[in-house]
Image (spheres, rainbow, N blue to C red):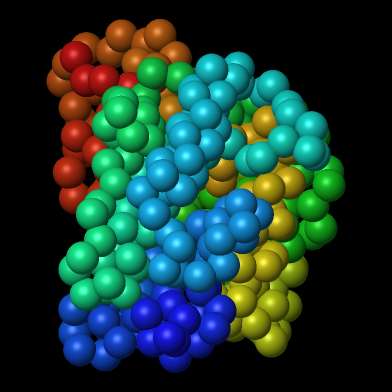
Amino acid sequence: MSKNFGLGSRSMKKAGMFALKHAEMVGAISFQTAADLGQRWGQFCEFASEHGVRQMEYVDGALVVEYGNQLAARVRENLNRLPGETYSDTELPLIRASTAQNRISAVNTVMTLATKGQWVPISPTSSSECGIAKRTHVRIVPPTGLNRDHLQRAMARLDARGRAITCLARELGLRSKEASLLDAVSALNEAVKTGEVTIEYGTKGGKSRRLTVSSDWQLSALRRAADIQGTARAVIPSEEDWKSWRENGLRFIRETLQQSGIRRIHDLRSAYACERYEQLTGFRAPVLGGNAPRDLDREARQKISAELGHSRIDITNAYLGGQR
C-alpha cells in the first residue's frame, strides 16, 4: 500500500505540497494560495512528527484538534500579554486568532484534497474542537511600536537590513512585503523632490498608491533603507527572491522583534496609523483614548485608509479602534 494516499512522496510534507500543486495546475487555487497553504501545512507536519505521525493516513481529527488546542493557547497568551512584555527564547511565538484559524483551515484543505473529499473538516473556533478565539476587526489594545525608544531597543538585535525594513514599516506604514521590495533609492529621490512616495511593489492586489512624506522620521527611514539597498533593485539582498527572503531573513526579523515585545511587523502599521491620525485630527486615536469629532474622525480615516492601501474606511477599525 502506497503512503500518503499515493501522492508521490513518502514525506507527508512533500505529499501535501504535491496535492496543492495539482490543485493549482487545474485552476482550483492560485499560485499564492498554494504557497501560503503549503507553508501552513509544513508547520502542521512538524507538529504531527513531534507526536509520532509521519504519514497522512494516520492524521485524524483528534490530532488536528490537539494542534488547534495548542494554537488556541498561544492566541490566548497573545491577547493577555501586556504591550512591551517580553518572553523567553524557549516559548513558542505568540500568534493572532486569524493566523491560528488559517493554519487549521490549511490542514482541512490539504487533507480534503488528499482524501478526495472524504476528510471531515475540523472547526477552528468550535469550543468542542479547537476553541480558537474568533477574529475581531476592532483594535482594543494599543499597538506595540508606538514608543520609538522601545522600538529602538527591540531593533538592537537586528542587522542593518532588518532595522531598515522595521523602520519602513513603522514610519511609512508599509506591509512587510512592501518594505522588503521597496526601491528605497528611487523612493528617497521622489520624497525629496515631491514630498511623496509611490508604493508599487508587494502591494495587496498589485495596486500602487502614494504616501505623503511629512516628517524627518520618514526621511530618515528612507535614507537608512537606501543606504542598505546600494545598487540593488530593492531593500532585500539582490541574490534573494521574495519567497526565500520571507522564509529566512524576514522570519528572523519577525521572531526577533517578538522576543523584544513587538508583537508583529504589522503592528507597526497600526502604530503609524495612530500617529498619523493624531497629526490629521489633533486627537489621539480612539484605541489610545482619543475622542475626535465625528467629521474629523471620518476624514482622517479616509486619508489613512488610502495611505495604508485599503479601499474601505471601516478597515481602519483594526488599526485605530472603533469609529464614533
Asked if residue 241 shows in the view, the reply is yes
Q: Residue at x 32, y 40 (%)?
A: 124
Q: Residue at x 33, y 66 (%)?
A: 111
Q: Residue at x 61, y 68 (%)?
A: 247
Quarter of the view holding residue 22: bottom left
User: Extreme front residue here?
Assistant: 1
71 sits left or right of 203 in the view:
right
- Quadrant into which the N terminus falls: bottom left
- Quadrant into which the C terminus falls: top left
**91 shown above or below 102:** above
Q: Position of residue 251 (x, y in %)?
A: 64, 58
Quarter of the view holding residue 53: bottom right
Along the line of sight, the residue nearer the viewer: 237 or 23: 23
Asked if residue 189 shows in the view, the reply is no
**94 shown above or below 76:** below
Along the line of sight, the residue nearer the viewer: 172 or 242: 242
24 sits left or right of 239 in the view:
left
143 sits left or right of 116 in the view:
right
Along the line of sight, the residue nearer the viewer: 168 or 219: 168
Along the line of sight, the residue nearer the viewer: 305 or 131: 131
**137 shown above or below 64:** above
Q: Position of residue 103 (x, y in %)?
A: 41, 52
**254 shown above or below 145:** below
Q: Position of residue 257 (x, y in %)?
A: 69, 42
Q: How many marks?
A: 0
Q: Position of residue 29 (x, y in %)?
A: 24, 76
